[in-house]
Image (cartoon, rainbow, N blue to C red):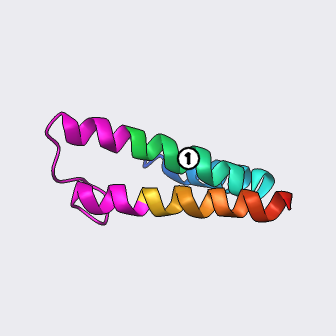
Amino acid sequence: MNQPYDPLRLCIYATIALLGWLLGPVALVVFAAVGFAGYWRARRAGLTRSKCFLRDTRLVLAYLGVLTLAGIGGIIWWVF
């Protein structure tokens, strides 16, 4: 018997959005930096293509790096 579709990802996305809303740029820095570190390790291990929309891991790393910098800028703007 086939199991019904479980939209777990949507719950995860909603939780991440909530954290982003509550923590602002701090959440962005944390999630982007964790993602960057994960893709960095994966690229060093030989991953060149990702299931991410951007596909090329170099583009994913650049995207996550820009998000990290934007979050840091947001924290600076938020504090001062």
Vertical placement of 51 versus 66: above or below? above
Question: From where the camera sits, is residue 1 visible?
Answer: no
Residue at point 37% right, 38% down?
38
Residue 54 position, x and y percent, is 29, 66
* Residue at the image position 17 percent from the left and 54 percent from the top: 49
The answer, for residue 53, to whether it is visible in the render is yes
Count of labels shown?
1
Tag 1 residue: 31
Residue 2 magenta-highlighted:
no
Q: Which residues are magenta?
A: 38-63
* Above or below, 9 relative to 80: above
Residue 12: % across, % down:
57, 47
Residue 41 location, quadrant: top left
User: Within 10 Å of the Cα at label 1, are there few (<14), some (14-19), or many (20+) other Cα atoms?
Assistant: some
Q: Quadrant of residue 37?
A: top left
Going by the numbered disc 1, the residue's amino acid type is: Phe
- Which residue lies at the image location 40% right of the left edge and 63% below the top edge? 63
Quarter of the image with the N terminus in it: top left
Q: Is residue 29 above or below residue 54?
A: above
Quarter in which the C terminus is drawn: bottom right
Residue depicted at x 66% and y 63%: 73
Across and down, in percent, residue 9 comes to: 49, 49
At mark 1, the secondary structure is helix
User: Is 51 included in the stretch rendered in magenta?
Assistant: yes
| Residue farthest right in this picture | 80
Where residue 71 sits in the image (x, y, percent)? 63, 59
